[in-house]
Image: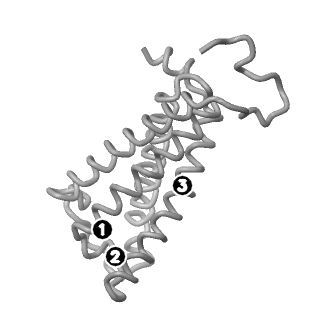
Amino acid sequence: MFRGVSEKTNWRAVIIGWAIAIATGIVLNLLFEAAHVLLFGGNVLNPDNLTTALVALSLLSGFLAHFAGGYVAGRKAREHGGLQGVMVAILGFLFVVAAALIISAIVVATAGLFLVEGGVALPALTLGFAGGALLASLALLALNLLGGFFGGKLGEWETGPVNTSGGPDSLRGRTR
């Protein structure tokens, strides 16, 4: 099963799609933040105050960012677009998990040395993912996967000139 997925995955397209998803996510978050400040009079959204608006905007921007990244990956790969889009979301998820683990390891390793004398009291093993935060994170992952899938399918489905490498066109001699 995994061999088939690995053979069908165009990693170059996935990495390009992931970069597009990151850029799109940053732009969308800045736009949503600006719109929120303009509409609601200067109250800036922050992760310390986990409100419904913040969760909804996070879900929406994650879906749209991975839709754009999946679209680019599917368009670049020209086949198995849904898989390419899902792999964009999975690659992003794996990088977030890796970054969280590295940062957590650095904080745990250096807490007694650099932050305060006697170290820092470590939180419970839930790592902040208890109750609603865990459900919101799982919903975000599911929407990112769906956004990547649908974007990839749309990118695969759309036809037109896409080859920018100067090589032979991958659709030549192939009918849809």
SS under mark 3: helix
From the image, tell me which residue sits under label 3: 22
What residue lies at 43% left-to-right and 34% top-to-bottom? 149
Of the 4 image quadrants, the one containing the C terminus is top right
Residue 110 in the figure: left or right of residue 49? right
SS under mark 2: loop
**Tag nearer the camera, 1 or 2:** 1
- Label 1 is placed on what type of residue? Leu
Residue 168 in the figure: left or right of residue 155? right
What residue lies at 33% left-to-right and 45% top-to-bottom? 143
Marks 1 and 2 close (CB-CB < 8 Å)? yes
From the image, tell me which residue sits under label 2: 46
Compute the Cα span from label 1 to label 2: 8 Å
Q: Is residue 157 above or below residue 164?
A: above
Residue 145 in the figure: left or right of residue 4? left
* Label ID, residue 54: 1
- Label 3 is placed on what type of residue? Ile
In this rendered view, identify the residue nearer to me: 39 or 126: 39
Neighbour tally class for label 1: few under 14, some 14-19, many 20 plus, Cα within 10 Å: some
Instruction: Choose the circle earlier in sequence order: 2 or 3.
Output: 3
Compute the Cα span from label 3 to label 1: 18 Å
Residue 129 in the figure: left or right of residue 17? left
